[in-house]
Image (spheres, helix red, strand yellow):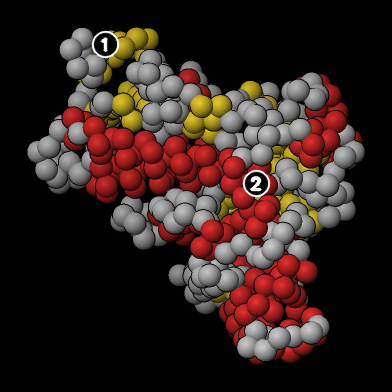
Amino acid sequence: MKIVIVGGGTAGWLSALYMSLFNKDMNNEVVLIESSKIPIIGAGEGSTGILSRTIKGNFLDMGIDETQFLYNTEATQKMGLHCKDWNEIGNDFYSPLQPTDTALGSTDFDLLVSMCMGNYYDGSPAGYLLANGYSSYGTSKADIGAGSSYHFDAHKVGEYFKSIALKQGVKCIDTEVTSLNRNSLNGKLESIETTTGKIDADFWIDCSGFSRVLIGPMGGGWKSFSEHLIVNAAIPYIHEFEKNEDIKLETLAWAQPNGWMWQIPTQKRYGCGYVYSDMFTTYDKAVDELMKTTGRKIEPLRNLKFDSGRLEKSWISNVVGIGLSAGFVEPLEATSIHSTVVQLDMLLASCLNFKYDIDITSYDTIIDLYNKHFQKMFDDFTSLIQIHYISQREDTDFWKYCKYEMKKTDKIKEILEICKFRSPSGQDFDVYHGGIGWGVWCWVMVGMGILTKDIAYKTLNSYSLKKCNSNSEIDETFRNHFNRIKQRNSIFKIKAMTSKEFIKALIDKKLPK
């Protein structure tokens, strides 16, 4: 079987690496088409824990050493998200990359007890380490068990995956697609015309990003999320570290007058950008806003326009859209690479096992199940992102619109109603591969003031063996539970390197094994 991937970058070369490794004994030919004329921004990007688990070989042996990945991509760790000024100016909160140990249960006791008796993020080891300036690397061991992922230069990550894929036998052609040739009877894509000639294949993966050069003409359709998410442009730029700056292992998401700004630390500098809505400001005004808020001189790399949404069908016949080709919500919560990994996992492990002589593209049920999985996943992403905008801010027309006029998703309406009576829990969210459950939602809900301490106390009281007449009685009832959380966190702290120690070891290439 011949598999052709159109588009390089992180999604394209990760797809090529998956295909080459999964099918290395099956004599499949894997070809990737990319154009040297199409630039890659690479300002800085973050990821979720699913990428770190992939790099470490939890799903599929990628043949990657995590330490070498960090060294070769200018990567640092990501312990979580630091949200600044979202609910009101001056209000900050942390969104750790690791859920609590009780997040999947009927009640998230670790979260609720931590909310009532300490800091809400103490419920997660990663949250405790993040807030106190630590990494999840031990002083003598690479992984101490606290959740983390990566910040990196996206261009270098794509190049790193490319170097490994080429060693696995993937062929690379520098060309551009000009047209498609489909079978008039069954609609399958048989070949493409390019600037350097005709290329045929049995199966196609579209990683061409927003261009969607294959899946678009195949009839993938598009569902826009613009009624729920109103930011639609981004201004990426680079900011150098200050002298002797203490670099934090966090993605900074700083709310701005008409959107929000990201700041991601790589080993050498910050990758930054302003995600804004052109309904409320212009490109030039957005740059001015950014310089005024940050006090920095900004030199934008470009102005990117996007439409938050997803394909109605990301798999049609023998063509699959992966990465940005399949959908894009917005940069907040780093769902892009997350979705790419999940799509590849599902495509290979569940749908396209090439070890058998079966034309899976003829099985409509399998394709329909795949499409429904990712329709739901992107729709759920939209709700998670939107909860950040359920804010009390009214200082600009943008924030007034978010508060009073933005159409809420059905999931948002459901969760807001639940929070009037009790804390949500793992049972209120669907569990599926790649799904965003309560373990991610809870940090934002607490930080935005949607899940309040009052509701936390009421929920704990309902589980107390005796009726408590005051919050202090509830504290006493759950004191031992909170002490266990504190003891666990103190053990993690003893084991962990500080952020400063970790970055120095990273730059010196002396990370513990």
- Quadrant of the rendered image containing residue 443: bottom right
SS under mark 1: strand
Residue 133 locus on image (x, y percent): 71, 67
Residue type at mark 2? Lys
Q: How many marks?
A: 2
Quarter of the image where the N terminus is located: top left
Q: Which mark is residue 436?
A: none
Side (left or right) of 421 relative to 243: left
Towards the viewer: 507 or 393: 393
Tell me which residue sits at (57%, 71%) in the image.
Answer: 107
Side (left or right) of 68 relative to 226: left
Residue type at mark 1? Asn
Tell me which residue sits at (53%, 63%) in the image.
Answer: 426
Towards the viewer: 80 or 277: 277
Residue 459 locus on image (x, y percent): 67, 72
The mark nearer the N terminus, 1 or 2, is: 1
- Quadrant of the rendered image containing residue 448: bottom right
- Relative to 126, is 362 above or below? above
Side (left or right) of 8 relative to 284: left
Towards the viewer: 335 or 408: 408
Residue under circle 2? Answer: 413
SS under mark 2: helix
Residue 198 locus on image (x, y percent): 25, 12
Residue under circle 1? Answer: 181
